[in-house]
Amino acid sequence: MRSEYSQSKYNSENSLPLLEEPVSCASPRVQNSSRKNKLLSPGLIISNNSASWHTENVEVRSSLPSQGQVIPSGDAIQRNVELEALCAEQAVMIKQLSSQINLSLEQNLQELLLLMVKKRNGGSQVNGEEFENEKQRWMESEEGHGGIAEVKKAAAKVGSKGKKGSAFASALAAELATSRIEREKERAHLKHENRVLKLQLRDTAEAVHAAGELLVRLREAEEAASATQEKYGQAQQETEKLRRQMEKLKKKHAMEMATMKHYLAESRLPESALEPLDYYEKNINPLPDDDMSWRSAFRTSYQ
């Protein structure tokens, strides 16, 4: 069982250095303390994937024993159970430490980025949008550098068996650097296009605003034209009504004039009836004996 367990430890190159030593039957308390000291050493930082792989490798196989396989004893089963519990505890601790380290690194990174942006702006206040843009730019740059470093490491590891590993790593790094330069050029081109599109959008917005104002004015002009047309229709109706009334009055006046002429022709008097009114005055002669002597009697009264 011990030989099978040690063989399962060396199946991959990414296995944990905690279990690379053979398991002894010493006191489990001493083993726990030594493993915890190794876990808390500064050089031991692993990912969650490797911790989960390590936990899966130390699980006790529950399948039926094949032919020629020795059934483990009770002590071996108990030791395997203890090892499994210890590995699970270590995986939890590693996960917690990794999360704490990542949180601390994130906080330090934010502080450094904030100081850098403040220094670049001359100590002025930094808004959230500028800080987020700087953080995104830094993360993209770090991802590019990290990718180049990982590819170099993997190429060196793969090419360590041959003679062209370093040359392959250098060529791949140069290719990645070229792709990064191309990506920066593409980003600059996209930024330029974004500015051009923003200008076009602003011009379009101004044109839309002017078109809206023109549409409002056209609508007002249409309303005024419709109101004028309505008033013109009403005036035409009034004119037509007055014209009809005038025609009626003309017809009535013509009929009245014809009637008056008819009545006048029927009621005409003879010429003897048309003598002047002073007929009797012409025939009156003054008295010859009127000497106006009677006025002398009244002269004293009105003098």
Image (tube, rainbow, N blue to C red):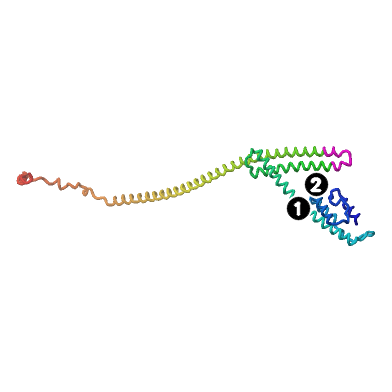
Question: Which residue sits at x=37%, y=50%?
Answer: 249
Which residue lies under the disc numbered 1?
96
Residue situated in front as seen by the camera: 116 or 169 = 116
Q: Residue furthest right?
A: 68
Q: Quadrant of residue 134?
A: top right
Camera-side mark, 2 or 1: 2
Which residue lies under the disc numbered 2?
43
Say what amino acid the circle numbered 2 marks: Gly
Residue situated in front as seen by the camera: 277 or 5 = 5
* Residue 188 as seen in the image, left or right of residue 209: right
Residue situated in front as seen by the camera: 284 or 237 = 237
**How many neighbours does mark 2 have within 10 angstroms: few (below 14), some (14-19), or many (20 or more)?**
few
Say what amino acid the circle numbered 1 marks: Gln
* Residue 49 as seen in the image, left or right of residue 73: left
Question: Which of marks 1 and 2 precedes in the sequence?
Answer: 2
Residues under labels 2 and 1: Cα distance? Answer: 16 Å
> Which of the numbered marks, if any, corresponds to residue 11?
none
**Span shown in magenta:** 156-170
